Amino acid sequence: MQTSDLNPLRGSPGPSPWSSVPRPPHPLALLQGIYFLITGIWPLLHIDSFQKITGPKTDLWLVKTVGALLIPVAVTLYSHRAIQGNHWHAVILGSLTALAFICIDFYYALNDVISDIYLADGMVELIFLTGWIYIARKKLRCSR
């Protein structure tokens, strides 16, 4: 075996995932990735319009930090199949990120700490979480 036969991401035999045409992302990963990319970039590009919709913020640095952190999550969700054919990484990242936002959105919106528009975001995240649970259950049934 030659060094060129090693997969650079795994250090094991097999073709590099970069040498073949990447598969498109799972539709749920694509949707959640786009949603996170838009909501992540928005406060970085135009904080004033972001605050008009979501309400005034006292810690703009925190809003921008969360936005910046959503960008790599979005890119990872979008690119997971191009890098690795396994859906489990996307299931874990997508479902746990959605669950975190659900908890934050509902708790703080229902306690009047943040704007009620975050209840709408919580509902979107609930749809993502439901989708990931469905995919995980389907994959577990197929593996038996």
Image: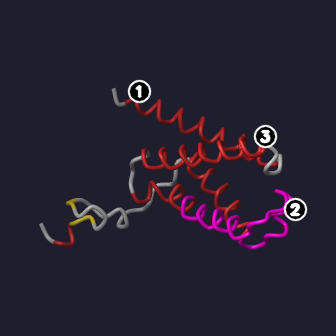
Q: Is residue 112 above or below residue 70?
A: above
Indicate whether 20 appears above or below 136.
Answer: below
Q: What's the distance in space between the residues labelled 3 and 1, CA to CA?
A: 37 Å
State the CA–CA distance, disc 2 to disc 1: 45 Å
Front tag of 3 and 2:
3
Residue pointed to by mark 1:
141
> Residue shown at 78%/45% (left/top)?
109
Compare residues 15 and 138 and report the one nearer the observer. Answer: 138
Q: Which residue is mark 2?
A: 52
**Quadrant in the rendering for residue 131:** top right
How many numbered discs?
A: 3
Q: Is residue 96 above or below residue 8?
A: above
Labels 3 and 1: the sequence-earlier one: 3
| Stretch in magenta | 44-73
Q: Which residue is mark 3?
A: 110
Label 2: which secondary element: helix
Nearest-to-viewer mark from 2 and 1: 2
Q: CA distance from mark 3 to mark 2?
A: 19 Å
- Of the pair 129 and 87, the residue shown nearer to us: 129
Residue count near mark 3 (Cα–Cα under 10 Å), binned few <14, some 14–19, many ≥20: some
Q: State which tag comes first along the sequence, 3 or 2.
A: 2
Amino acid carrying label 1: it is Arg
Crowd band around label 1 with a 10 angstrom C-alpha radius: few (<14), some (14–19), many (20+): few
Foreground label between 3 and 1? 3
> Could you tell me which secondary element the residue under label 1 belongs to?
helix
User: What x and y, as percent, mark residue 23?
Assistant: 46, 55
Give x and y (percent) for residue 24: 51, 54
Secondary structure found at label 3: helix
